[in-house]
Image (spheres, rainbow, N blue to C red):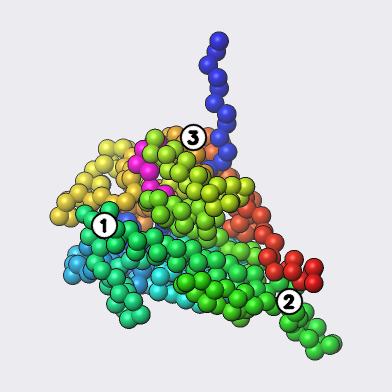
Amino acid sequence: MPAAVPAPLPPLHLAVALDGTGWHPASWREPDARPRELFTAGYWADAVLEAERGLLDLVTFEDSLTLQSTRHGEPDGRTDRVRGRLDAVLTAARVAPLTRHIGLVPTVVTTHTEPFHISKAIATLDYVSTGRAGVRVQASLRADEAAHFGRRSFPVIRPDRPHDPQVRELVADTFDEAADHVEVVRRLWDSWEDDAEIRDAATGRFVDRTRLHHIDFASRHFAVRGPSITPRPPQGQPIVAALAHATVPYRLIARSADLGFVTPHDTEQAAAIVAEVRAEQQAAGRAGEHLHLFGDLLVLLDDDPAAARARRARLDARLDEPFTGDAEIFAGTPAQLADLLQERQRAGLTGFRLRPAVTGHDLRAITRGLVPELQARGAFRRAYEADTLRGLLGLGRPANRYAARTASA
């Protein structure tokens, strides 16, 4: 009998992760890195507009509450690498009016940031972008970040002690807090019904107070009454994303997110991660919900694979040792990367978040090399087909959880 023909794959989703001058620590020393412009609005606007030129689903903006460091939970004192950031939410809000289609997903650290503040910030971003906002929630166990706030303290967690019972308990509790944080944010987004604003000059009624709701959320981590001060966002619920490398953060994705970023280093590992997250999703009672899983890859792209490998070697030579990170590093051509993405997609990933090694070079290689290659294979869109980020990801606009109470009252 002839071999079975594999079922055609659905079109891929693509995102780009923006961080400084690029994800390789030596990227700022490259000729096209623009390090002197790194803290200007124009630098970030150019990057996001280039991503939109490539019809990408979304960009993410990295953030943290302390300086970047090569050490776990403490500063490293280095002066040969990019240090310092602009605020991710404010950067996304600045570039939002300059774009029309691409999703904007800043990172926020849930561990030291109040959910009420995050809810109104991301709701505002959704208004400014006309429905293209999301948020990547990040739990932090860094001792140096905690020291900025003085409300709690964390020990410096050593990477050689992953099974320490105290560390495991702290990790579990911090991610439980992140799940509660997301729940509060989501309830605050729903605390205004869609038609709460009447704006009737004749009667003098701007808002219907019966359509604003106290959320009355109480847990071990938060007690929040609500309602929000910001009306329900255009998407109803902006996209919630999270990055995960192990079971506890996989559980956060399964419980709380619309989109998870994971870091497999081969196709077999990709399939195993997808299976684990899907099992956690079912255990969380969300088996019927559409949860995207994107694989992260750090990429160096050139027309000649030898050129990409040589560029990686040149960048690594500027460091103390070859650079490695949490995500797999790919150095090759756009066609070779397209082959890899389609292979990993067969393992159950629904899309990919690419981390340009050098933003000035590799972002253009993604939009002008990889995207046309995928389009030629029928694996990526040729035009934007939705006006909101939820629409681009194939997610419907969710009903307001409190509107049903009003209707039945």
Residue 284 placed where, x, y %? 54, 52
**Could you tell me the amino acid type at mark 3?**
Arg
Q: Is residue 361 something one can see in this rendering?
A: no
Image quarter of the C terminus: bottom right
**Residue 100, x across and y down, in percent:** 59, 62
Q: Position of residue 298 (x, y in %)?
A: 35, 49
Judging by the rendered image, the residue that carries numbered circle 3 is 346
Kindly report which numbered mark, 3 or 2, lies closer to the viewer in this rendering: 2
Q: Is residue 343 visible?
A: yes
In reply to whether residue 263 is colored magenta, the answer given is yes
Identify the residue shown where x is 50% and y is 44%: 279
Give neighbour class at mark 2: few <14, some 14-19, many 20+ (Cα, 10 Å).
some
Between the C-alphas of marks 1 and 2, the distance is 48 Å
Q: Amino acid at mark 1?
A: Asp
Q: Residue furthest top?
A: 1
- Residue at label 2? 211
Q: Residue at x 42, y 39 (%)?
A: 272
The disc at residue 164 is 1
User: In the rendered structure, which disc, 3 or 1, sits on the residue that comes first in sequence?
Assistant: 1
In magenta, the rendered stretch is: 262-267
Q: Name which quarter of the figure residue 200 lies in.
A: bottom right
